[in-house]
Amino acid sequence: MKILTLVGLFVQLAALHFTHAQVIREIEFNVYGQYPLRNVAFIPVDPSAIAAGIQPVPPVAISTHTLSRTGPYQFTGVSMLQFYNTQTSTPVGSVTLPKESNQWLLVFINNPRHQQNPAQHPQYLIYPFDDSYNSLPNNSLVFLNLSGKILDGLMENTRIHIGHGASRVFRAQESIALNLWMRGLNGQELLQAMTKRYHFESNHRSLLIFFQPVLTGSADLDVRFLSKALP
C-alpha cells in the first residue's frame, strides 16, 4: 500500500521538528460518516510519538456504516490526526483533538467545496465529538447539530433550542416525542425539520446527529440515531 511510505517520511519530519517537549497522548476514537467511508486510513503513531521513542505502527484502514459507529481505533500522538486515501496516499481530511478528552467520536462529512477546488479543500470535514462518559453519560441523550441550521422545537412538552454542534445533556426517558423547526431562507418562515418519537433502552448512551437535508431546498433533516450500550 502506497501510504506505507508515509511512515518513513513521518520519521524524517520528526527528527527535524521535534525540538520541544510535547505531551504524547493515548487517544481512543470511533468513527461515523454521513455517507459510507471507504479507502481511508490513518497512521496510529504520529511523528512526535516516534521521536519520543514509540515504535511506528503500520497504517490502519477505517470504514463507516450507516446504522452504527465503528471502532474503537487507537492513536498515539499530540493532537493532530490525519487521514489518507489508501490508493493514492493523498490526504483526505484532518482533525485536531482538544486536550480535555482522550475519547472521541469523529464524524466525517463530505466537504461541499472539495469538488470545486480539491487542491485547497480536503475531501472530508471531520467533527470531533467528546465521547467520554462525562460528555455523554449513561441513560442520557445529546443532540449533535451538524446541519448548519439553528433548530427550535419541543421535546415532549418542553421547548428546546439547539444551536450548532453538541447540545447540553438530556435525560433519556423510555420514550420521547421530538418536533423541530428551522427558519426558511427569508429568516421568518418556520419549516418543519423533523417529527418523530424515539424509544430509548436503559444503560445506553444516545446521540442524535442532525445533518443537512439530502435534497437541496428540502427542510427535512438527515437524522441519525446512535445508541451505545454500556460494556
Image (cartoon, helix red, strand yellow):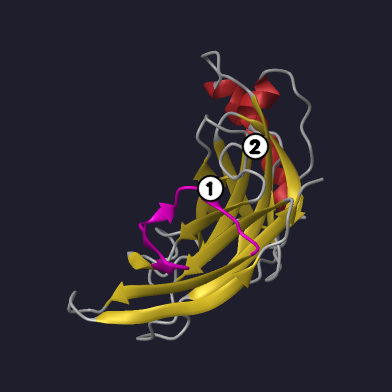
Give the residue displayed 62% in from the left and 54% down from the top.
Answer: 84
Say which amino acid is labelled 1: Pro
Give the residue displayed 60% in from the left and 56% down from the top.
Answer: 172
Which range is magenta?
Answer: 154-174
Q: Is residue 89 visible?
A: no
> Based on the displayed image, in which of its 4 quarters is residue 54 positioned?
top right
* Mark 2 Cα-neighbour bin, 10 Å: few <14, some 14–19, many ≥20: few
Give the residue displayed 51% in from the left and 14% down from the top.
Answer: 20
Q: Position of residue 66 (x, y in %)?
A: 67, 71
In the image, is residue 47 above or below residue 60? above
Q: How many marks?
A: 2
Given contact means CB atoms under 8 Å apart, are the residues at marks 1 and 2 in contact?
no
Say which amino acid is labelled 2: Leu
Give the residue displayed 61% in from the left and 25% down from the top.
Answer: 48
**Residue 11 placement, left or right of 134:** right
Mark number for residue 128? 1
Q: Which residue is mark 2?
A: 9
